[in-house]
Structure formats: structure tokens, C-alpha cells
Image (spheres, grey):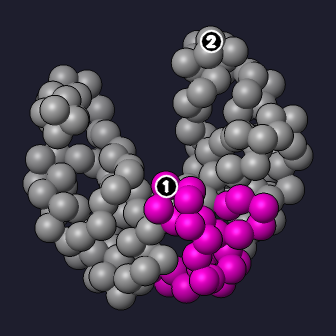
Amino acid sequence: MATTMISEIIKVVGTPVQLAGGLRSREQIETWLDKGVGRVVLGTLAARNPQLVQELALRYPDQMVLAADIWQGQLMTDGWRTPAALQPDDFLASYRDVPLAAVMITDIDSDIDQPDAQLSVLSKLAGATPHQVIAAGTVHQADDVARLKFIPNINGTLIGRALFSKAVDLEEA
């Protein structure tokens, strides 16, 4: 069902689609790229098999997005459930010379526990990578989008919960 829905979205939206969540093999990633996905977001796979992700990034430049999901200062994997052995800074450093489309940094604390949290985690990590950064978990109201403009290396933001709860109007943001 989800596969059919994602395939339909790819066909209908008329803009590149970024796909994230549960991509754990070369076969899955290449299948989605063949179906027309513009970018894939890789976190758990990137932490567990960096060589594969580096190979994919070389083969598909500008289509791999590295996900760094941070909770209480730790890099998390498996849908935010498992702490990784790597520190966030080391994780980002290991992909410094890899041709990534971007790095998506999710501040899980801000997204779930502390909606008014400062942007210190995001700011620190965005400054630690040469790649463009997509901020996630930091937008709770329209003003938060404006605050992101002042953090160097932020190229975009992912707005999820705030859109669903109608706390942010997309046109206003």
C-alpha cells in the first residue's frame, strides 16, 4: 500500500520527491531511484554501512541525503530508537568528502520534548559539515523559519508536525 502511494506521489506531484525512512539496502535505494525519487535520506544505513552509502553517493551524486538525528546529544538510528556508537560530530566528519545532496539534521529534543529549545545543536552541527543542511524538528511556528535564516549553512527546513497541527501556514512560512 505505501509503495503504491509513494509511486503515485512521484508521478503526480511534478517536483522531485525526497524519500526517507527504512531504506536499508542498495536494492531498495536503487529501486526507488529507478522509480523517479529525486533524493533518498539515509540515517541508519549511513551509521551502520558507511562504505555502501559512500559508494551510492559516488554513483548517484546529489541524490543522497545524510540524516543525523540527534537526541540528548547522541546520534540515533532505527527511527530514533537506538543510540549509535558514533558521536554526531564524528558521523558528519566521516562524510565530509562524500558528494551528498545535503545533510538533514533533526533535533529530536526540540521536535518532541522541548518545542521552545534553542537552535544550539543545529547551529553547532551545521557548522561542522561542508554540505548544505536541512533543519528538521525546529519549526513550531512561522517565526522559527525566519530564525533559521541566521544560522550559517542552513539551506532549507522540513516542516511536518507544525503543518499538520496548523500551527504554521505554508504560505506564511
The magenta stretch spans residue 149: no
The residue drawn where x is 25% and y is 25% is: 13
Query: Where in the figure is residue 73, as x and y percent of width and height?
Result: 77, 67
Q: Quadrant of the C terminus?
A: top right
Q: CA distance from mark 2 to mark 1?
A: 24 Å
Q: Count the marks.
A: 2
Q: Secondary structure at mark 1?
A: loop
Amino acid type at circle 2 is Lys
The magenta stretch spans residue 76: yes
Is 62 on the left-hand or right-hand side of 77?
Answer: left
From the viewer's side, name the closer residue of 139 and 85: 85
Q: Residues within 10 Å of mark 2 (few under 14, many from 20)?
A: few
Please report the bounds of the magenta region as a residue range. Answer: 70-99
The dot on residue 172 is: none
**Comparing marks 2 and 1, which lies closer to the viewer?**
1
Which residue position is annotated with label 1?
Answer: 79
- Residue 152 seen in the figure: no
Which residue position is annotated with label 2?
Answer: 166
